[in-house]
Amino acid sequence: MPRQPPPTHRLPRGRRAYAAGQDAEALAAAALTAEGWLILGQRVRTEAGEIDLIAER
């Protein structure tokens, strides 16, 4: 999944953290896929908050 650009209102430090978080999520998704997991969702928003990855073996 390509990285989305960070919102423009974030400070430079926040933009770096946002980008690093997205990169880490992409690496985790790739590692899970390589081990046979199926990625069902990424960055899923719920009433309780955001779920970074939903995967099923």
Image (cartoon, grey):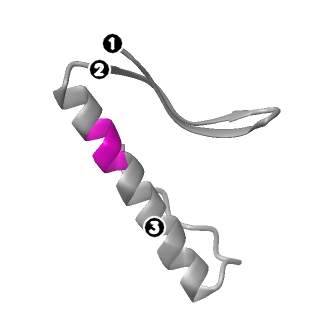
Q: Is residue 34 left or right of residue 55?
A: left
Residue drawn at the location 19% of the way across and 25% of the way down:
35
Q: Is residue 10 above or below residue 46?
A: below
Please identify the dominant SS of the magenta region. Answer: helix
Give whichever of discs 2 and 1 has the lower sequence position.
2
Residue 6, given in percent of the width and then of the height, sits at: 56, 67
Q: Residue at x 56, y 87 (%)?
A: 12
The amino acid at mark 3 is Ala
Q: Is residue 11 magenta?
A: no
How busy is the neighbourhood of tag 3: few (under 14 within 10 Å), some, or many (20 plus)? Answer: some
The answer to whether residue 19 is left or right of residue 27 is right
Residue 7: image x %, image y %?
63, 68
Return the residue at label 1. Answer: 57
Query: Which is closer to the viewer, label 1 or label 3?
Result: 1
Q: Tell me which segment is drawn in magenta.
A: 26-30
Please tell me whether mark 2 sits on a helix, a strand or a loop: loop
Pointer 2 residue: 37
- Tell me if label 1 and label 3 are in contact, CB under 8 Å: no
The Cα–Cα distance between marks 2 and 1, rounded to whole angstroms, is 5 Å
Residue 32 visible in the snapshot:
yes
Q: What amino acid is at disc 2?
A: Trp
Q: Which residue is mark 3?
A: 19
Give yes or no for residue 27 being in the magenta stretch.
Answer: yes
Residue drawn at x 28%, y 31% as measured from the top left: 32
